[in-house]
Amino acid sequence: MPSDKANKSAIRIVNRDETSDADSSKNELNIATDPAVCQYCFGTGTEVVSGKGARPCRCRAQDSRQRFLEAARIPRRYANCTLDNFKSDPNSSPNIAFRYACRLVLDYPDVDRGLLFMGPVGVGKTHLAVAILQGLIQKGVPCLFYEFGSLLKEIQDSYNPISKNSELRVLAPVYQAEVLVLDELGATIPTDWVRDTMHQIINKRYNDKKLTIFTTNFLDDPRTEQDEAAARQDEAIDDQDEAAPRRRTRGKLTVDRRARQSDTQTLEDRIGTRLRSRLYEMCNKVLIDGEDYRKRLDKRRFDSTRI
Ligand SMILES: [Zn+2]
C-alpha cells in the first residue's frame, strides 16, 4: 500500500540469512511476544532481503496456504491425514498407492493424469487423497475436496426454491478447482439424475484438462471367491457397527450400503460404461488390496478410517 505512510516507513532490510536456525528461533520468539506484527515486513506484505531485493513477504505465502487449506473443504476427520503419517508395509499395495501419491505431489504441475484409488473400505484411499491435497496446498496449489454424495446432495438442495444457493454456485468451485478430490465415487444409488450430474462434472473437468483424484469402493471386476470371503468378514464387522446411521439416509440420495458391500456390483455397474472409460482416460488406476490392510488390522484404526 504505497499511500500508507506508516506501512511504507516500516519496510526494513533483513540482513540475516532467512533459512538459518538462529533466524527461525528468533522468529518464533517474536511471534510469541507480538503475534500481530510480522517481523519481516511489519505488516506491509513486502520484505527486503539484502542482496536479493524486495519480494512478497513469506508471511503472505503462509496466509495464502492457510486460505487454500480452509477453502479445500477437507473434512475435519481427515484434517490430519498427510503423506508423512500414512502407514504401510513395504511393497504392499497401500505402499505402492502411497508412492503414486508422493509422485503426483512431487511432479505437479507436470502431471497430466489424476489417480483413481480403488479398493475396499478402510484401506486408506481417502487418507491418501487428502494427503495429496495437503501436499499440493503446501506447494501453493488451490485444491478442493468433496465426498461425491455430499456434492450431489448440495446440488439437489440448490433446486429448492428457498435455497440461497444455485446449482452454478455449488458447481463453480468444483469446475474451477485446480485439483479436485471426489471421494466415494459410485456410493450413491445411480439414478438417471445422479449419472447425468456425474457426467456433467467429470466431463467438464476432463475438457478443461483439470486434474481430478477419485476414490471408490467399487472394483473393476466381479470379485473372486477369496474376496467374497473377505467381504463377508467386512459385513460381519459392519453389522456390529451401529455408529454410522447417517450413511443410511441422506434425503433422496441414499448411500447404498448393501450394494457397497456387494460381491457382484462393479464400478461400471455403478457409474456406467461411458463414464468408466472416461475415468480411465483421466486417471491412473491404483488398486489397494484389502488383504494387506487386514494383516495389520487394528480395530481402532479401522473405526477411525472407515466412516
Ligand atoms: Zn510479513
Image (tube, rainbow, N blue to C red):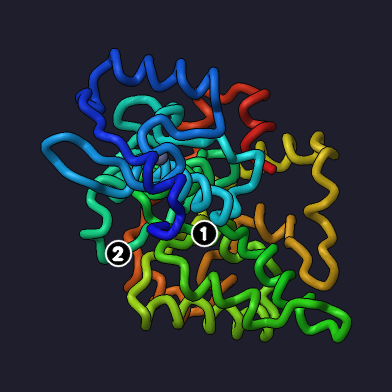
Q: Residue 118 at what x, y percent from top left?
A: 46, 53
Instruction: State the CA–CA distance, disc 2 to disc 1.
Output: 17 Å
Residue at (42, 57) in percent of width and height: 1
Q: Earlier in the sequence, mark 2 or mark 1?
A: 2
Question: Is 2 in front, or is 157?
Answer: 2
Q: Quadrant of the C terminus?
A: top right
Answer yes or no: is residue 255 visible: yes
Question: Is 202 in front, or is 226?
Answer: 202
Vertical side of 63 occupied by 166: above or below: below
Left/right placement of residue 34 relative to residue 128 reads right
According to the picture, the residue beneath numbered tag 1 turns out to be 144
Numbered disc in front, either 2 or 1 = 1
Q: Residue 164 at what x, y percent from top left?
A: 80, 77
Left/right placement of residue 45 relative to residue 232 reads left
Mark 1: few, some, or many residues within 10 Å (few <14, many ≥20)?
many
- Name the residue type under label 2: Arg
Residue at (38, 78) in percent of width and height: 206
Q: Residue 220 at what x, y percent from top left?
A: 46, 62
Left/right placement of residue 65 relative to residue 237 reads left
